[in-house]
Amino acid sequence: MSNYNGIFLRSALGQGNELPRKGPQNMSPDILLLGIAPVADPAIFAQHYDQAFNKPLLAAQANYIYLRGKNYSNQPINDEGDTRPRLFWTKASLLMWPQTWTELIAGPSGQALSLKAGPGSVGVTNQPYVWTPQNISNDHYCLIAVVPSPGYDNRIPDNQISDFPAFVATHGGIAWTDVTVENAKTLTISGKAMFFEMGDESADIQFTIVCTNVPVGCTVSFSAGTPGTNPAIYLPPTPVTAFPNFSAGLTCSVPAGYVSDIYYNLVVPQGLDISNARINIMAAYTTGANASQVLASNELKLQSE
């Protein structure tokens, strides 16, 4: 047994920093699965370090994933240079072959993800990873996290890893979790609606999805993954109840300099025609001299392929 004195990722709640980790390795509580709902402040994941966040992910929709880890060294650990956090996905059937994994790189702000932690503190990535998994059958997905620390080799080898649980158990900066993905049972359209930029002044902003020729019975939602607004920019799945025009949204306090991709989801029950459907994501001021002024808008013609 040895102690890992870097940013340590657990395989179970209640673990300290001893290596090798004991027990199953495939349900790390430090890979945080949020589904399609973002959070306003990821600091909650450090405050609730004794709690797992493991929501099912939704196939064909944009899902959010955070990483966290506790710094057991006596020095702050940042992620300058090649020490940035990394996250990979793979089908379980290919877990032993890292060369087949796919790395998730982009965060919703367009900036590099970061995980920093002071001595004895829990660090959380500054923004989530965004992943849109596809339907899967006769297999399941896995996520593998890597958070480097000075003095430790947490590199993933290029060759086959014949005993993957043993490999993870002996590397304190590597974690793995199996993922539950709920397959889409009907047509689901998801994508990036816009890149939203707030500008130099904070303000209350009304975010609205405007539907044209979207049939009654469809469900719409949208979200922005970058934290920092109050509340989080998130419209939960909302049934379309009027035709041909329908809208829904929410108001958020948005800080100056805030930027984020905004993603939309449309779920279409079988038999409904969306050939002439369009959606428009809009952001408008709600108060002050700019009240009702549209800050950003992007209309999308929906494709069912």
Image: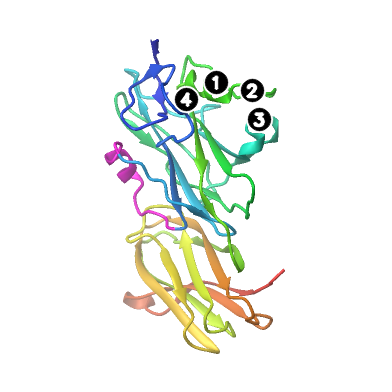
Residue 149 visible within the image: yes
Q: CA distance from mark 4 to mark 1?
A: 11 Å
Q: Which tag, 4 or 1, sits closer to the chain's start?
A: 1
Label 2 amino acid? Ile
In front here: 60 or 26? 26
Q: CA distance from mark 2 to mark 3?
A: 8 Å
Badge count: 4
Residue wearing tag 1: 167
Residue wearing tag 3: 98
Question: What label sits on residue 161 in the rendered view?
Answer: 2
Who's the residue at 60% across and 67% down the image? Answer: 188
Q: Which tag, 1 or 3, sits closer to the chain's start?
A: 3
Numbered disc 1: secondary structure: helix
For residue 44: magenta? yes
Q: CA distance from mark 1 to mark 3?
A: 12 Å
Label 4 amino acid? Gly
Question: What label sits on residue 200 in the rendered view?
Answer: none
Residue wearing tag 4: 173
Q: Which residues are magenta?
A: 37-50
C-beta proximity under 8 Å, tags 3 and 4: no
Q: Which tag, 2 or 3, sits closer to the chain's start?
A: 3
C-beta proximity under 8 Å, tags 2 and 3: yes
Left or right of residue 42, residue 156 in this image:
right
Give residue 279's position: percent from left, percent from top: 57, 76
Numbered disc 2: secondary structure: loop
C-beta proximity under 8 Å, tags 4 and 2: no
Give residue 58's position: percent from left, percent from top: 52, 57
Where, by quadrant of the figure, is residue 62 drawn?
A: bottom right
Q: Quadrant of the N terminus?
A: top left
Identify whether 187 is placed above or below 175: below
